[in-house]
Image (tube, helix red, strand yellow):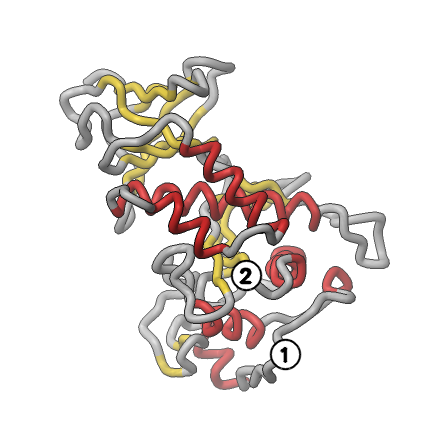
Amino acid sequence: MGNSYTTHDKLNISASFKPYSFSEGNYRRAHRGRYETAKLEVARIAVGAGGVEKDLNDVAGGAAREILMGLREVGEIIDEVRSGRDWKTSMMLEDVITSSVASQLSVEFNKRKDGSSDNVKRPLLFNVPRILHVSTKSFWLRASVGDVCVVEDYIEGQYERYVSNNGTLLFHGTLSSFCHFSYHESGGRLLVVDIQGVRGEERYELTDPAIHTSGSGGVFGPLDLGDKGISAFFLTHECNGLCRGLKKPKAKVERINTKERIMMKNGTFDPTTRRPSRLKKGGQR
């Protein structure tokens, strides 16, 4: 019942992790572990299938920079990193790129002033995962040598989903304003949502965001709902001082009524379709 190990030769990163997962979703299993090539830290490792090339993390980071600088079309960049790879590897690459974009946007957002303080009171910090592959494994691990995995820091504390993928908000405030800021800063090309993690005394530690892109969506994977997702967010978002001067969609967005808002809190209304839904509170992810 020993540990399994992951490595990335180019980045000289190595980590070990337990054979049994502490949490599972539709697409991944999360394992506790630790980094072996640096100060020992707890890591969350999600295991998938498929091979990985040594430079994919660099490609993902470059894609994030180019998206924000507007040098290339988002779809072309994502297609480039997806090309010739299996769906699980592509999904993990989308995770890395999405987190990279959210992280870079949060750096700029953290500099904003709301008129009542010098800057954002509680800054945002997004985990950006690294892609590694399994180099050795224990008997009990449901993976094979060579399988792809993503590694990121484990977040201690009370985990919450503050802004869901379908526009549901836990509360109005800094994180909702960040979503609005991401739309403005990208020139209306994208909106960061699915904001989840832990609210600490000094900062928000966040992970696993999603992105909606203008148009029909799908650029950042199945959780990219396109214009429908963007409209759903602005149905519920209430601007505050941190939103001052930020652009909104040109098309008029019909805000939800009181009955629909109550249904959203109960998890029985989906603002992306404006119909009753069986979604649980907290969103789709």
Q: Residue at x 26, y 51 (%)?
A: 26
Circle 2 — which element?
A: strand
> In which image quadrant can residue 50 be found?
top left
Q: Is residue 261 left or right of residue 183?
A: left
Residue 190: image tag: 2
Binning the other alpha carbons within 10 Å of mark 2 as few (below 14), some (14 to 19) or many (20 upward) gives: many
Residue 201 spot, x, y in % from top left = 66, 40
Q: Residue at x 41, y 45 (%)?
A: 95
CA distance for labels 2 and 1: 14 Å
Between residue 188 and residue 223, name the one nearer to us: 188
Residue 253 in the image: above or below residue 90: below
Between residue 3 and residue 37, name the one nearer to us: 37
Between residue 238 and residue 252, name the one nearer to us: 252
The amino acid marked with disc number 1 is Lys
Q: Which residue is mark 1?
A: 250
Residue 229 spot, x, y in % from top left = 47, 69
